[in-house]
Image (tube, rainbow, N blue to C red):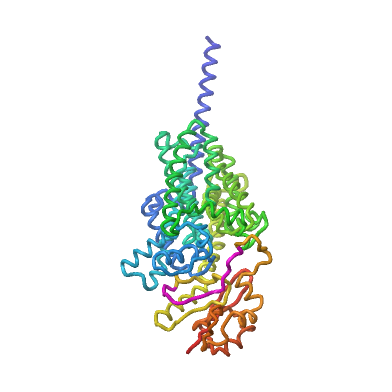
Amino acid sequence: MPNDLRKSQSQNMVLFQRRRTENLQATTDDSLKTEIPFDNSSTIVNNKKLLFSSLILFRLFNALVTKTYFNPDEYWQSVEVAHYMVFGYGYLTWEWKQRIRSFAHPLIFATLYKVLALLGLDDGNLFIYAPRLLQAFFAAINDFYSYRLAKKLFNDSSAKWTLFCSIISWFNFFCSVRTFSNSIETSLTIVALFYWPWPSLDIPRNQNEREIMLRISLSLAAISCIFRPTNVIIWSFLGIHLLWKIPKHTISIVTNTIIILIIAVTTMIIIDYKFYGTFVFVPLNFLHFNIFKSISLFYGTHPWHWYFSQGLLVVLTTLIPFVVIGIYSARKNSRYWIRIKPLLQLCIWVLLCYSLLGHKEFRFIYPLLPIFVVISGIGIDEISSIKNSYLENSFTSSKKSAWLKFSIIFLVITNVPIAYYASTIHQSGVIEVMNYLRDEADKGNIKDIGFLAPCHSTPFYSNLHKNLKMWFLTCEPPLNHDINLEEYLDEADQFYKNPLEFIYTRFEHSTFNSSSNDSLRKWPSYLIIFEVLLKDIEYILKQLEYNQVSSKKRYFYFSASYLFNIILYIWIV
């Protein structure tokens, strides 16, 4: 009996210690959710409708203050095409002639244009800003579901910091409200990731609910792949990962994928048939020209490591240290680590796949930014934790609070100025020029317009909304296999190589007397050039009786290669 009693006491002591440990751990977990700036009673964050409405208002503000030019595709592959679809005039670049783009994405803005036209609102600044205001709604979805994904995978505290990082990110402010297909691709991808049935999550426990979530996620992924065929890189990885982790549901996963794939492909083919007038499978043409024929290399090549050495550094900027801290924090927590690991693997997979392609751009990896934003939220949450922080051994709670405040201030002062400069000053001249031309066109002062500038340097008909004759120096790539990409010069290249020779051989010699030679380009009443050309062709313009607009109409234009003004020349009859 004494032995049995001692054994029983020993077991009770072990049980007591175990329960004490569990209670202590629970208290520790609760303390991890304690952070300084955010209060659990925060009304906006806890009210989904109010939060989403607030994010929409913020992104509407974002859209209205954005007055700069980032990349031609923002206009020439979206709203310019939409303008053509609705109003019958607009410029279609070679991609549309070769049928490597789907009309599905421009259809969004074409629908908006049609509604505005039916309401008699297709005139004035509202028409010009409308596509960007619509995109602001999708940008708000990006912020909202970044927050919800962090909350679903981790905790409330990390989610709130994720929301902060999403809002403060300069690249989000700069790119999210622009009418790129990449922008809506990013929004659709983060929503699809939220509904994705992550194997590491126990919820929902009901298999029917998980299947519904899978269908929602796959549907959004399919739409995203229609807009951007390269988005399939993301979902091929996640699909294989899901099959690997839960092989018992292989039949259900594959069946749902095939059904949604058939519906998506059929819808895409119907849309493109409507506007191309023939059956075409755009993703195949996209691969043929951009991958197999390497036409994308015509627009620039970068070293294989560019996304790692430059791309991520620019897109993330000062979020990078918090991404590192977030990974470190998750690595210590097995529950977090098992959830964050597939996201990290996905990012590495996408970056490696994109690195194999010669032509690289910052916006191509934009869909990864919300994932890094989520990880940054974990990093700031780690700094904000009062207990069990890796800083605990070296700093007191007051010093940790100081580090948190420093982190917030650091992110604000490094992101806000960049966002302001990039969205309101950098390459703003070309937008202001189009605004000036639109005002002049409304007054009936313009007959035709010419752009002696690098191709697609400005928006076009979608920003003028007047069926005037306009031309620009083209930059069609060599679609013939026999032409060497390195030796090929497009029209814009030929002009800048020798402006005088180009003018004498390609243009009429007078603005008053039209030539019978239709191959010669006619001088327009309004001519837009960059200041850098003045030293070469100013005397020709004077001979042609062009008059420079007042210096008040000089607009700054910045690029990686130049820092100069854009000057508007007007021929006054």
Q: Is residue 246 above or below residue 511?
A: above
Question: In x, y percent, where is residue 449?
Answer: 49, 79
What residue is rendered at 58% in x and 50% in y?
323
Q: Is residue 331 above or below residue 566?
A: above
Residues 65 and 442: in front is 442
Q: Is residue 533 above or below residue 1?
A: below
Read off the magenta span: 464-478
* 227 lies left or right of 112: right
Question: In x, y percent, where is residue 497?
Answer: 66, 75
Residues 399 and 218: in front is 218
* 564 lies left or right of 127: right
Question: In x, y percent, where is residue 180?
Answer: 49, 60
Give the residue furthest to the front.
516
Question: In x, y percent, where is residue 482?
Answer: 66, 61
Q: Quadrant of residue 466?
A: bottom left
Residues 561 and 142: in front is 561
Q: Is residue 204 above or below residue 187?
A: above
Q: Is residue 113 magenta?
A: no
What residue is rendered at 34% in x and 69% in y?
121
Res. 218 in view: yes
Q: Is residue 465 magenta?
A: yes
* 56 lies left or right of 325: left
What residue is rendered at 64% in x and 52% in y?
356
Magenta stretch: dominant secondary structure: loop
